[in-house]
Amino acid sequence: MSVSDAPTTPVAGPGPPGGPGGPSGTVIAAAAAALVLLLLILMLVLASGRAQRPDPAPSPQAGSPSEEPSPTTPPTTPPATPSVEPSPSPASPAEREPTDSDAAAFAAGYQPPGEQARSVQADVDGDGSNEVVFASITGGATRIDVAAWDGVAYRVVFVDQGGFADRIDGFFVRDFTFDRTREIVTVQAVGVQGQSLSIWGHDGRGYARQPAHGGCWSGSHTYGGSGAAIEPGRITATCELAHRPVAAQPSAVYEWDGAAWVHVRTVEPGP
């Protein structure tokens, strides 16, 4: 067989540019593989970084303790306000029973507005403590001032006027009504012949006049025109009738009936 008759085996030559067998396809494939590998490596690095990085501290929630202040900004503490203790109020004097010295001191220090003032210490209302009673002449008539103990001091609690007077002939505080209270009596005079008495007491509610019921002095707590006298349970007082001279005036007799001075009879003057 001649050389020209031997079978021939075709040899593949290089493909066209850009074909699978060409050099450009190989380079692209290699680059793609490298890129995929690089992406895998990058993903591994990122995953490893997340695993090693600590979680951020949770932000403080409502009600949780606040963060420590920055060392460069020390916390400021407001200045303490000193507490102010309330000043104690002055203590009220303790109540107590009066002494004779208390009554004497008040009698010496109190001056009624009038003339011929005098005082008596006696238990008028029957409560066991003495009152201080003053008699004087003010505006041409007798005046009484009654001071009572209030637990701490004596205070004037009653003032009243009696009969017309130029002078005071008598002043006393005694029991004339047969009870635990005492009556206040002033005997006053006007001129040479005029004389009367005025009387007050305590009726259980307060100091009050003791007026006559009936007779020539009905409604008045002053008895007598030219003479008057008092004894336990009885008052005798001359009337003041305009049509009779002084020597011919009758006398009205009053007796205490447990509540008032009641007229019981009128006595004509003797021969």
Image: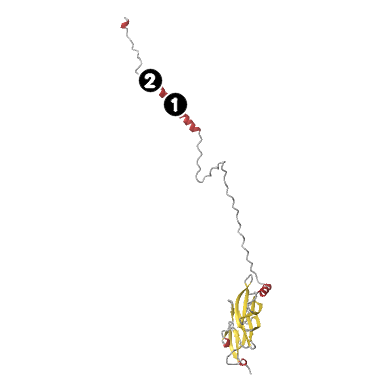
Mark 2 — residue?
24
**Residue 241 picture quarter:** bottom right
Q: Position of residue 47 (x, y in %)?
A: 47, 31
Apparent side of residue 183 relative to residue 18 in the rendered image (left or right): right
**Residue 69 picture quarter:** top right
Identify the secondary structure beneath mark 1: helix
Q: Nearer the viewer, residue 40 or 170?
A: 170
Amino acid identity at mark 1: Leu
Q: Which mark is residue 146?
A: none
Q: How many numbered discs, if any?
A: 2
Q: Position of residue 40 (x, y in %)?
A: 44, 27
Query: In which quadrant is the C terminus drawn?
Result: bottom right
Identify the secondary structure beneath mark 2: helix
Q: Position of residue 90 (x, y in %)?
A: 62, 63
**Image: 65 above or below 261:** above
Mark 1 — residue?
38
**Residue 72 picture quarter:** top right
Q: Position of residue 240 (x, y in %)?
A: 59, 89
Q: Residue furthest bottom?
A: 271
Query: In which quadrant is the N terminus drawn?
Result: top left
- The residues bearing labels 2 and 1 have C-alpha atoms spaced at a distance of 21 Å
Amino acid identity at mark 2: Ser
Residue at the image position 42 percent from the left and 25 percent from the top = 35
